[in-house]
Image: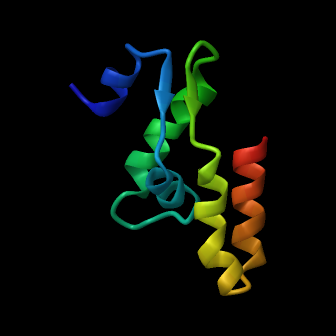
Amino acid sequence: MGITDVLKNHRYVMCDTAPIIYFIEEHDTYGAIADKVLSLAKESPEHHIFSSVITLIEVLAQPLRKARMDIVDKYRDFLLN
């Protein structure tokens, strides 16, 4: 049984900051699994993925320090829409 099979049994999933970073920044090792987890909500309207209000602050800190507005925009779009 894979992660997507387990998650399909849960309508509400709380997601930590790290999988969101892996997904947005297309991490070589963890990006694919993060994509599977975060795509669940897109594929199935009865499933909802939540994150903390602190997540936006956590994901924006490093890109803002490095003036990577392209990444900042990707995070804002993903988390606020």
Q: Quadrant of the C terminus?
A: top right
* 19 displayed left or right of 54: left
The location of residue 10, given as percent across then percent down, is 42, 16
In the orientation shown, which residue stands out farthest toward the left? 1
Relative vertical location of residue 37 with respect to residue 64 in this rendering, above or below: above
Residue drawn at (65%, 45%) of the image: 53
**Tally of numbered tags:** 0
Q: Which quadrant would residue 66 be assigned to in this image?
A: bottom right
The location of residue 48, given as percent across then percent down, is 58, 23
* 49 displayed left or right of 28: right
Q: Quadrant of the N terminus?
A: top left
Q: Which quadrant would residue 2 be assigned to in this image?
A: top left
Residue drawn at (32%, 22%) of the image: 5
Relative vertical location of residue 14 with respect to residue 79 in this rendering, above or below: above
Residue drawn at (38%, 47%) of the image: 33
Of residues 36 and 57, the one drawn nearer to the viewer in this rendering: 57
Of residues 31 and 47, the one drawn nearer to the viewer in this rendering: 47
The location of residue 26, given as percent across then percent down, is 51, 63
